[in-house]
Amino acid sequence: MSSKNQLIDEILIESIIEKLKTALGLKNDTEVAKALESDPRLLGTWKKRGTVPYEKIIKLCIRKNINLQWLFSDGSSLPTICRDNGLVSEEDGYIKVPRYEVRASAGGGAIIHSEQIVDHLYFKAEWVKNALGIPRDFLVLISVQGDSMEPTLSNGDLILVDTRTSRVEDGAIYVVQYGDALLVKRLQKKYDGSVVIRSDNPLYEAEIIHGEDALNLIIVGRVVWAGGLI
């Protein structure tokens, strides 16, 4: 992410935190973290990464009847995100992206199926076109489970996935189906056809798969956004 985009993201995070204080009558950042059922020490990480735990914020807004469009909108080039609550529509310049009840992790998972759609979020069509350049029909939202991709992705992060992608671009982050597991990892394809599966968290060792195992690796899609462009 460029320094300019990172600065914009940091400003947006500050705006979200301040709006949550206003809406909930909270006094400081620590109270915001507690309202989100998060460790207050993570606030600095959120601001540094230019991201927040979107799934937790959405759930909190639903419980407290906070308008998501007001919370996430800042008039910049960043995405305005709205829940599918009947208050906005595609006629208002939004596109609807399905959120699936599956989690990409270092453990077990399931391939994405249409019946696993639990709801939709609306993104500004202009942002999707200009920042991502991805046709709407190829975008899906799922959640991250576990800490294997820290500090890039945290447990509970909502990620936007481009499902057009079927080939590996070295160093990018992908959601992949490997056996019975749905994983979110960095991939590197080697000249001999093997694939290196890497975690960003140094506590997890890289895994190399060869031959038929590599051919059986299913690319679900490339992660393009997780509270910030990837």
Image (cartoon, rainbow, N blue to C red):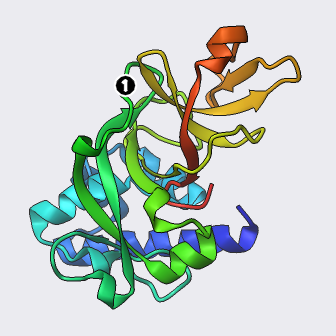
| Closer-to-camera residue (158/22) | 158
Q: Is residue 111 left or right of residue 153?
A: left
Residue 58, how many percent across, how many down? 26, 60
| Closer-to-camera residue (212/76) | 212
Quadrant assignment, res 211 = top right
Q: Say which residue appears at 53% left-offset and 27% top-offset.
A: 148
Q: Say which residue appears at 31% left-offset and 52% top-offset.
A: 99
- Which residue has dot 1 on it? 109
Q: Say which residue appears at 22% left-offset and 56% top-offset.
A: 119
| Closer-to-camera residue (192/88) | 192
Query: Can residue 31 be seen in this snapshot?
Result: no
How busy is the neighbourhood of tag 1: few (under 14 within 10 Å), some, or many (20 plus)? some
Q: Quadrant of the N terminus?
A: bottom right
Position above or below: 21 against 199: below
Task: Give amino acid for label 1.
Answer: Gly
Quadrant assignment, res 229 = bottom right
